[in-house]
Amino acid sequence: MASGPLDLGATLAGVRLHFCAMNASGARCGTAAELRGLAGSDAGAVVLKTATVHPFVHRQYRSLQNPGYDRLLPLVAELAARERVVIPSIAGATLDELVTLARAFADGGATLVEVNLADPWVAATLAPFESRDGFRRLLGTLAGASSRPLALKLPERPGLSYGVLGAALEEAGLRVVVAKNDFGGFEKLLVEAGRIFDVVAVGGIRSGYDVTRALAKGAAAVQVGTALVDEGPVIFARLAREMRAARGERQA
């Protein structure tokens, strides 16, 4: 029997989340209704679908289709007014575009801003991992542009070693990294870059056991994608119940 209530919260760059699980960008977060549904759930934060400077309609890149950041800013302000942790996700073909997005969402009420460097379109246009010096400049410029903490979403194979990535992140003052939920993703990052980052593991989260296992391996929080699409926002209450049941807590 547990001696006290289980703390299921998380802290990312000093920001406190009441629950350590949230949606992944792109999972049931593309419309105002979906975002409001997440805001009314037990999710620890509301992550917006990745936004670009201009409306994005390219069929080849469905994961980035969005109405443009200016259409999403009012929703960020609305959700922030409901005292929710709001995390816009941004992508750009140039550093200037990322600066515009980071600054606009930070000033518009975001709690954190996720810089999505994992999308293939970003790799093909911005090429953020082409050189160590270029990556350092990117991080330093973005950190200086945003009044809110930044979270960096990494691809499966960044192109630079995790040691190099970790040193650049530390130099720029970025403390939050979103990485794939496997050994080659966040686990290897923590081993090679050092456990100085708040890592959000994404992928393969379907149960409270999955959440607990990711936390035990060093993740600070998790993002839920496919399972959220299948089940809807009620999944976050289920994950919390399963985590508490595993601890032996009585269910209300």
Image (cartoon, rainbow, N blue to C red):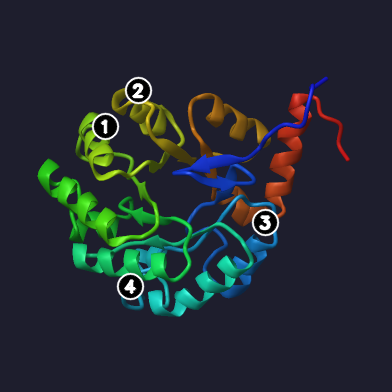
Q: Which of marks 4 and 3 is nearer the N terminus?
A: 4
Residue 92 in sight: yes
- As helix, strand or loop, the secondary structure at mark 1 comes to helix
> Could you tell whether 61 is left or right of 26 in the image?
left
> Could you tell whether 34 is left or right of 111 in the image?
right
Residue 191, label in figure = 2
Dot 3 amino acid type: Pro
Q: Which of marks 2 and 4 is nearer the N terminus?
A: 4
Q: Earlier in the sequence, mark 2 or mark 3?
A: 2
Q: Nearer the viewer, residue 6 or 59?
A: 6
Residue 216, label in figure = none
Dot 1 amino acid type: Tyr
Q: Is residue 144 above or below residue 193?
A: below
**Label 2 Cα crowd, 10 Å radius (few <14 / some 14-19 / many 20+):** few
**Label 3 Cα crowd, 10 Å radius (few <14 / some 14-19 / many 20+):** many
Residue 234, given in percent of the width and then of the height, sits at 72, 53
The residue identified by callout 3 is 233
Q: Is residue 76 above or below residue 71?
A: above
Q: Which mark lies nearer to you, 2 or 4?
A: 2
Q: Mark 2 touching mark 1, by CB under 8 A?
A: yes
Q: Which mark lies nearer to you, 3 or 1?
A: 1
**Label 1 Cα crowd, 10 Å radius (few <14 / some 14-19 / many 20+):** many
The residue identified by callout 1 is 162
Quarter occupied by residue 211: top right
Q: Which mark lies nearer to you, 2 or 3?
A: 2
Q: Which mark lies nearer to you, 4 or 3?
A: 3
Dot 2 amino acid type: Val
The residue identified by callout 4 is 58
Residue at horizontal 40 percent and vertical 43 percent from the top? 176
Residue 62 in sight: no
> Could you tell whether 58 is left or right of 234 in the image?
left
